[in-house]
Image (spheres, rainbow, N blue to C red):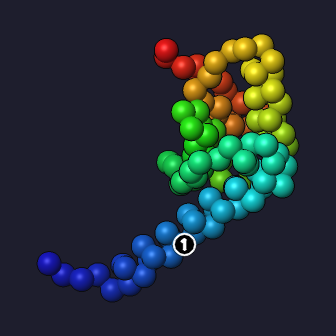
Amino acid sequence: MRRVPGFRSDLSRLRDVLALVVLGALARVRAVDSTLYQEVQTAEPGPNGAVIVSLGRRRVLLRGVPPLEVVQAVAAVRRQLAASGRPYAELDARFRGWVVVRRSHT
């Protein structure tokens, strides 16, 4: 097996960038919606630059570090779902202008 020069350092840099994106997303959530932030159990990089924020059995998908309007939209959708008593498994805020609600299968 041949070593590729710089390969390991490139992976390390990629890991650092992904960690910064996740931290940036969490910082934005904390700044905009402290209630949502308090419910965060884990956050990790997802596919295609997404950030997956786990809230117990529910999760929120964000595209990178979201603008404050996106976090506000997620908060508004969460409030509406809670007020109407509708269960959900996932809120997907990766799409411009939309928060997609995916229901629980139970």
Q: Is residue 17 left or right of residue 28?
A: left
Q: Is residue 64 left or right of residue 5?
A: right
The correct choice, above or below, for 22 with respect to 69 in the image is below
Give the residue displayed 52% in from the left and 49% down from the top.
46
Question: Would you say 54 lies left or right of 7 here?
Answer: right
Identify the amino acid type marked 1.
Answer: Asp
Q: Is residue 15 above or below residue 6?
A: above
Q: Nearer the viewer, residue 29 or 50?
A: 29
- Seen from the viewer's position, the closer of residues 102 and 14 is 102
Name the quarter where the N terminus is drawn: bottom left
Where does residue 43 sit, x and y in percent of width and height?
58, 52
Residue furthest to the left: 1
Q: Which residue is identified by label 1? A: 16
Residue 57: percent from left, percent from top: 54, 33
Q: Who's the residue at 62% across and 22% down the image? A: 88
Mark 1 secondary-structure assignment: helix
Residue at 38 percent across and 84 percent down: it is 6
What residue do we see at 50% from left, 48% from top?
Answer: 47
Quarter residue 101 falls in = top right
* Residue 98 seen from this side: no
- Residue 60: image quadrant is top right
> Relative to 44, is 83 above or below?
above
